[in-house]
Image: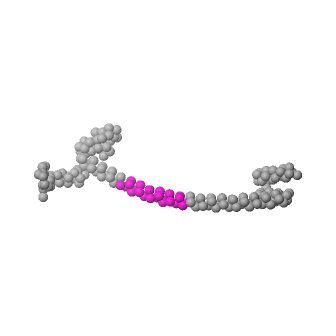
Amino acid sequence: MDDILAEQAADLLQRHARGDLDREGVVEKLASSDPRLGLLAGLLSRQSVESETETVTDLQAQLANANQLAAEAGQLAEGLRVEFDGLVQDVGGLRARLDDLAAALGACPGCWGDDSSCGWCRGRGAPGALPPDPDAFRRLVRPALQRRADVRPYAQPGESVIYD
């Protein structure tokens, strides 16, 4: 008799695995063949449902946590993007100032004569290598030279190097 029940149980499990019979169908068939097996199968089924419910609840909590982390990561990424955009603007402004100064001094704007592989000057663009741009020279260099003309070449200890 036990062999017959074992064969029936194996058949039911195979049918369930193939998708021919759902869990409730397996429990119903077991209960009809032996009430004790039906009771046991019913308990196992309830435990399985409770376990699935706990798993679903755990997965929902993990999903909520993942969504929170994704939102925080998105906010951080946006902050980094804004910071990066600001740095790009700063570098662009500094590059324009350096280009202006290079023009005022007659230097290569790419390397100032320091890079023999420079596509503009091949390392021959040190200050004075090119004719200075007159407007840039007037704006950037002349004020410094005029200020320098007001400086005493030698000052005694305690004296100002600037003429008053």
Q: Main secondary structure of the magenta part?
A: helix
Residue 118 in which image quadrant: top left
Q: Residue at x 44, y 56 (%)?
A: 80
Front-most of residues 101 and 14: 14
The stretch drawn in magenta includes residue 68: yes
Front-most of residues 3 and 155: 3
Q: Which residues are magenta?
A: 67-90
Please tell me whether residue 49 is drawn above or below residue 99 in the rendered image: below
Q: Is residue 113 left or right of residue 78?
A: left
Q: Residue at x 66, y 58 (%)?
A: 55
> Percent x, y for residue 27?
80, 58
Q: Give the quarter of the figure containing the C terminus.
A: bottom left
Residue 106 in which image quadrant: top left
Residue 84 in which image quadrant: bottom left
Q: Count of labels shown?
A: 0
> Percent x, y for residue 87?
38, 54
> Percent x, y for residue 34?
85, 58
Residue 98 in view of the camera: yes
Residue 130 in view of the camera: no
Q: Is residue 121 left or right of residue 71?
A: left
Front-most of residues 154 and 135: 154
Q: Residue at x 62, y 61 (%)?
A: 60
The stretch drawn in magenta includes residue 148: no
Q: Residue at x 80, y 57 (%)?
A: 26
